[in-house]
Image: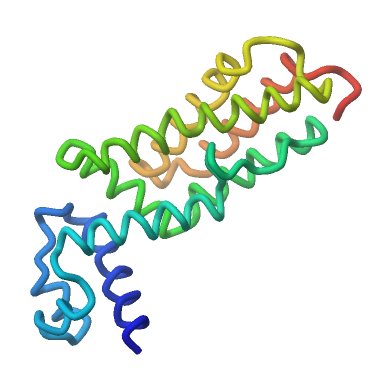
Amino acid sequence: MAKDTKERILALALEKFSQNGYAGTNVRELTASLGLVKSSMYRHFESKEEIWNSLLDEMIAYYDERFGSPEHLPPVPDSLDALLAMTMHMVDITIHDEKIIKVRKLLTIEQFRDDRARDLATKHFLTGLKEMFTRIFAGMMDKGLLIRDDPAMLAFAYTAPISALIHLCDREPEKTDDAIAQIEAFSRHFIKVYGVKGNE
């Protein structure tokens, strides 16, 4: 029961923080929305700051499990088609998973207030993707699937436009289908330019 209440608090906190930001989220309103009194919330979390940090911890684990990270790399693709499939799977999760969407909005709002949110935003929007694909591309070069080049530069060239299009989906959800089509077209173009022929 206590675990269920804790999870309910974190789920609603994610909802509220992603809509209103940290400062705009009131603990009393948060607990009232769950049918709890403020004192009962403090049996699970000592402060709003502890809710915030617990939520970030939970979301880091959730994201790593579903998407991957430099610390939890997905398997290096065995073909160029597998790279395209892996990319589109990652894009699908990033664009359609409600928790990940809310976390991205939360980090976008809070990166200017909170150092931890800033560091996570940098990691998830830029450096983490680049590091992950640097290792993936290096592995694909070792397998003879991609032409030899600087894997870090290729990773940056690959992930930056995809990340920009994902943020477009957050700002203008009506453009999601077009953004996904652009990402797939870009990935196919990248594979055509850097892929070693005969490894589809």
Residue 20 quadrant: bottom left
Where does the image place residue 4, in percent across and percent down from the top left?
36, 82
Q: Residue at x 45, y 38 (%)?
A: 166
Q: Residue at x 82, y 35 (%)?
A: 78
Number of numbered markers: 0
Where does the image place residue 48, in percent across and percent down from the top left?
15, 63
Colour logic: rainbow
Where does the image place residue 151, in percent across and percent down from the top left?
63, 17
Task: Answer left or right for 188 relative to 71.
Answer: right
| Quarter of the image with the N terminus in it | bottom left
Residue 148 quadrant: top right
Which residue ends up furthest to the right in the rendered image? Answer: 198
Please name whichever residue, 43 or 128, is drawn nearer the observer in this view of the structure.
Answer: 43
Which residue ends up furthest to the bottom in the rendered image? Answer: 1
Task: Answer left or right for 186 relative to 191.
Answer: left
Q: Residue at x 52, y 20 (%)?
A: 156
Q: Residue at x 11, y 69 (%)?
A: 27
Where does the image place residue 16, in percent across and percent down from the top left?
22, 62
Residue 17 quadrant: bottom left
Which residue ends up furthest to the top in the rendered image? Answer: 149
